[in-house]
Image (tube, rainbow, N blue to C red):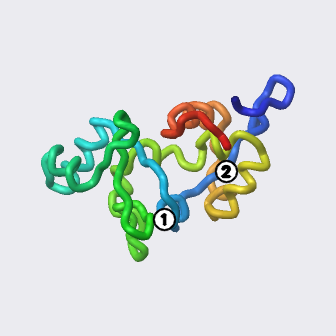
Amino acid sequence: MLRLMGNDLWFKGGLRFECLRCGGCCSGFSGTVRVGDEEIARLAQRLNLTEAEFREHYTRAVGGVVISLIEKENKDCVFFDKEQGCTVYVDRPRQCRTWPFWRSNIYSPERWKRGTERCPGMDRGRLHGADLIREMSDYDGSSGNVS
């Protein structure tokens, strides 16, 4: 549950974010980047692969139900390049598009501040309204846990 202040979310005035394509959210730590059938189809087309080929080379099953992008040995996303950034940025999965407005980041002002230590685009750029942030946080690919 998101922390409320009175009847309002703590970010009722919105939050600023501008993607700098630095890779802070794509590299250096293990995670699950959920991909659905539509995203797989779009990414396969972008890479000129069949969906079956894409699934075989770029995805893994997590918990028998969830399909996730694989990672490189160094824990970077398979589509992250240190020189270029995200090599599929235009077609990146929805989970990536909703960063940094994941429940784990917007749970509290303290969590948001902690996120800014990893992501230099947080607290700068365009102001995103609370309604949009709440909508994005409904699909962040997480299980709902904010620990």
> Which residue is under mark 1?
27
Nearer the N terminus, badge 1 or badge 2?
Answer: 2
User: Is 61 displayed left or right of 117 in the figure?
Assistant: left
Which quarter of the rendering shows the N terminus? top right
Position of residue 40 measured from the top left corner of the image (x, y, whole percent): 27, 43
User: Is 76 displayed left or right of 115 in the figure?
Assistant: left
Residue at the spot 42% in from the left edge and 67% down from the top edge: 85
Crowding at mark 1 (Cα within 10 Å: few <14, some 14-19, many 20+): many
Mark 1 or mark 2, whichever is nearer to me:
1
Mark seen at residue 4: none
Residue at the spot 79% in from the left edge and 27% down from the top edge: 8
Separation (CA) of disc 1 from disc 2: 22 Å
> Which residue is under mark 2?
16
Position of residue 68 measured from the top left corner of the image (x, y, whole percent): 37, 46
* Label 2 element class: strand
Badge 1 amino acid: Ser
Crowding at mark 2 (Cα within 10 Å: few <14, some 14-19, many 20+): some
Residue furthest toward the top?
7
